[in-house]
Image (cartoon, rainbow, N blue to C red):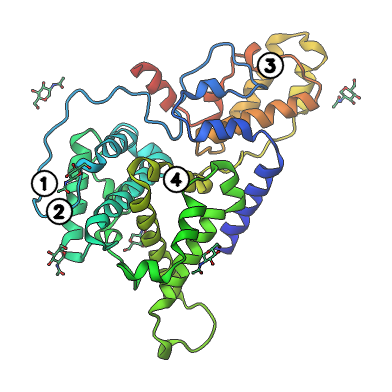
Amino acid sequence: MLLIELLMFLACFHECLSSPTDHLKSYMLTERRADAFLPAITPSASPQPFLPLLAPSPLTPFTNSTIPKLSGLCILNFTAAQDLMIMTSIDCWAAFAPLLANVICCPQLLATLVILIGQLSKETGVLALNRTLAKPCLSDIEQILEGQGAGENLKQVCSIHPSNLTEASCPVKDDEFENTVNSSELLASCEKIDPVKECCDQVCQGTISDAATRLALKASDPLSMDGPQVLPEQSTRVNDCKTIVLRWLASKLGPYHAKEILRGLTNCNVNKVCPLVFPNMKHVANSCGNGISNPTTCCDAMDSYVSHLQKQTLVTNLQALDCATSLGLKLQKYNITKNVYSLCHLSLKDFSLQGWFCILMYLE
Ligand SMILES: *[C@@H]1O[C@H](CO)[C@@H](O)[C@H](O)[C@H]1NC(C)=O
Ligand SMILES: *[C@@H]1O[C@H](CO)[C@@H](O)[C@H](O)[C@H]1NC(C)=O
Ligand SMILES: *[C@@H]1O[C@H](CO)[C@@H](O)[C@H](O)[C@H]1NC(C)=O
Ligand SMILES: *[C@@H]1O[C@H](CO)[C@@H](O)[C@H](O)[C@H]1NC(C)=O
Ligand SMILES: *[C@@H]1O[C@H](CO)[C@@H](O)[C@H](O)[C@H]1NC(C)=O
Ligand SMILES: *[C@@H]1O[C@H](CO)[C@@H](O)[C@H](O)[C@H]1NC(C)=O
């Protein structure tokens, strides 16, 4: 856990210092096609289809929705979050769900759960479903999404259990909430976040953690508290309370706005900077330096270099973008000023998950 935090800090540190954050910013919260944001360092001759991270996929919606079989027991208002459910189905579309689960589908699905319950709480005043309702509701959500084209078994793919719709171990889930946390501060720091700055400053995330800790400690039994150390069950409790806090935020913000915020927060964990290890470029420099006298030799050297990079795994498109930029800067340092990417027909897809770009191109 500490290691993860340290890594996140380092990633964040790097991201804050190295300035090409403008492309990140425009990239993360817009629904535009991402080929508009190819880094200047890689002027790609022929823009490739590129799946935006937060956007609904460029796929056309499904031609054939099936009518879901609902339990009739769930009291969530699916109509109120219809657009969100459609977007989730697209993000979890059967063909891509396993491949993009952790990056696109599951964060969107978790946000959907939070928002549905948050919306419900506006009527019930309760920020959780009880155990009796959690199971049929989760099943209904899955049915609806599947009916709209999402992959089957999203519960398993995303490790979601009925308990994720309840208060789990968080002791506060109702009108006590606003007496326990500083709700005006919470709303103020989270109603508007800058998706890039937030990952570094953690203003909203910090307030959420504070609020969750307050909730978690509120009902902690003083008799069972032997000392100041945070017991394992308490950290689980804080975690469960974070979900409650997010639901409260979603109830105040409305479905669309809440989705933007929640996805912005998730992206702080997903969008690390380029995780590739760049091996020595000497071979490339020898072949491509001096104004590229022999393009074939140069491109062979580039191809072998990039295929070496491809053996390492990239998680997100944003990483591909970062890595293309980093490599571009490295090439510049080696005095390779010609546009090697365009000379050698390299594009972002060469830096990214192999295969699914091609599928996308065929679908368009
Ligand atoms: C849509 O579903 C119906 C019933 O399952 C089927 O008969 C029809 O061929 C499907 N249409 C398309 C375009 O897949
Ligand atoms: C569900 O939400 C829709 C749209 O916000 C609203 O018109 C409808 O009255 C709600 N249904 C219930 C049962 O609250
Ligand atoms: C669960 O919540 C529903 C709706 O609020 C309520 O009708 C039902 O009685 C509750 N069940 C239990 C076991 O508390
Ligand atoms: C969902 O519930 C499981 C166990 O009930 C828990 O381990 C997991 O952390 C929960 N997921 C989220 C996102 O809260
Ligand atoms: C809530 O937070 C704000 C801003 O940090 C502060 O000014 C205010 O006094 C706090 N309210 C309570 C009740 O703690
Ligand atoms: C790149 O060119 C500059 C100026 O011509 C030179 O000083 C530098 O040593 C060169 N760098 C490499 C890695 O060859």
Q: Would residue 31 appear left or right of 292 to someone viewing this image?
A: left
Mark number displayed over residue 74: 2
The three-letter amino acid code for the residue at tag 2 is: Cys
Residue 160's x, y, as percent?
30, 54
Residue labelled with disc 3: 340
Q: Amino acid at mark 4?
A: Ile
Q: Is residue 71 left or right of residue 359?
A: left
Q: Amino acid at mark 1?
A: Leu
Quadrant in the picture for the N terminus = bottom right
Identify which residue is drawn at 39% across, 42% down.
257
Horizontal arrangement in the rendering, residue 353 relative to residue 10 (left or right): left
Which callout, 4 or 2, points at the residue further toward the start of the chain?
Answer: 2
Q: Residue under circle 4?
A: 261
> Which mark is in front, 2 or 3?
2
Q: Secondary structure at mark 1?
A: loop
- CA gap, disc 4 to disc 2? 26 Å
Viewer-nearest of labels 4 and 1? Answer: 4
Q: Are marks 3 and 4 in contact (CB under 8 Å)?
A: no
